[in-house]
């Protein structure tokens, strides 16, 4: 039986895409994923993630990746209720991955606080029936989801490096990163706008504009 794992990378950052990755592997080969040491991608160093991503592709039978760019995210987040709509967008993206892989059972790392609602949103978008397990921390508890999380994180990191070729080193793209915030403040002061790589619906940008306006720097 084919078992699928699906996870995301880049849900929270203000810069760059949200990436959804899924893998499909025969149940008998899940032990091979454990053997190479897959775990939640956030628990691994970048060089280890990169190495494991290549080993994962040598074990799994299939994989599929969906990227949601900043414009797609903004279309959803600008509408209310914001969080639920973003969760639904991610559920639809995970359904696209599962639809491509056609497993008998799929494990997903639930983005919604209500795991059953997230599960049902995915199932509603599928053209076939399967057993779907939607849980928090699935990327820690199930090797197939850990493997998917690694592929998603490596792909997002690749996209961020590509963006940096055009815009310079802006850090991780997360709002808690001082380098990212410094880049956004400097860019807005210089151009009175933000670059097309940012999620304009994120409140961080409104705060930056307000700060600079109050300080009369723009």
Image (cartoon, rainbow, N blue to C red):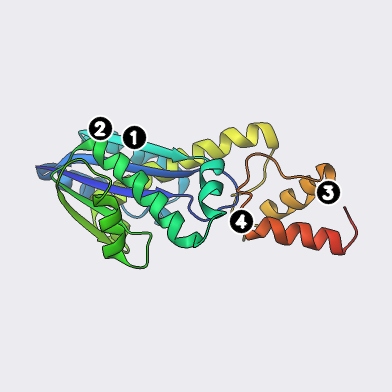
Residue that carries the numbered disc 2 in the rendered image:
58
Marks 1 and 4, the one that precedes in the sequence? 1
* Mark 1–mark 2 CB contact (< 8 Å): yes
Residue that carries the numbered disc 1 in the rendered image:
54
Instruction: For marks 3 and 1, give the CA distance.
Output: 41 Å
Badge 1 element: helix
**What residue do we see at 49% from left, 62% from top?**
81
Q: Give the image location of residue 212, x and y in percent.
A: 83, 58
Residue that carries the numbered disc 3 in the rendered image:
189
Spot the residue most to the front: 80
Q: Nearer the viewer, residue 28 or 102?
A: 102
Q: Which of label 2 and label 4 is nearer to you? A: 4
**What residue do we see at 35% from left, 55% from top?**
40
* Mark 4–mark 3 CB contact (< 8 Å): no
Q: Nearer the viewer, residue 180 or 191?
A: 191
Mark 4 crowdedness (10 Å alpha carbons): few <14, some 14-19, many ≥20: some
Badge 4 element: loop
* Relative side of 163 to 73, left or right: right
Residue that carries the numbered disc 4 in the rendered image:
202
Q: Which of label 1 and label 4 is nearer to you? A: 4
**What residue do we see at 19% from left, 38% from top?**
102
Q: Which of label 3 and label 2 is nearer to you? A: 3
Q: Residue 178: tell me if it is visible.
A: no
Q: Give the image location of residue 132, x and y in percent.
A: 19, 54
Marks 3 and 2, the one that precedes in the sequence? 2
Q: Nearer the viewer, residue 75 or 164?
A: 75
């Amino acid at each position: 039986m084919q078992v699928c794992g699906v996870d995301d990378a880049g849900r929270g950052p203000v810069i760059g895409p949200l990436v959804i990755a899924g893998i499909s592997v025969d149940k008998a080969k899940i032990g091979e994923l454990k053997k190479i040491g897959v775990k939640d991608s956030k628990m691994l160093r970048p060089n280890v993630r990169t190495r494991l991503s290549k080993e994962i592709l040598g074990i799994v039978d299939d994989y599929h990746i969906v990227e949601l760019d900043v414009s797609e995210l903004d279309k959803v987040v600008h509408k209310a209720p914001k969080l639920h709509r973003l969760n639904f967008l991610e559920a639809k993206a995970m359904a696209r991955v599962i639809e491509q892989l056609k497993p008998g059972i799929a494990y997903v790392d639930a983005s919604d606080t209500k795991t059953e609602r997230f599960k049902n949103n995915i199932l509603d978008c599928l053209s076939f029936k399967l057993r779907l397990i939607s849980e928090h921390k699935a990327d820690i508890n199930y090797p197939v989801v850990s493997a998917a999380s690694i592929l998603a994180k490596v792909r997002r990191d690749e996209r961020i490096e590509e963006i940096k070729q055009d815009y310079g080193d802006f850090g991780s793209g997360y709002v808690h990163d001082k380098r990212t915030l410094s880049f956004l403040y400097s860019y807005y002061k210089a151009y009175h706008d933000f670059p097309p790589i940012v999620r304009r619906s994120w409140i961080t940008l409104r705060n930056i504009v307000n700060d600079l306006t109050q300080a009369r720097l723009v």
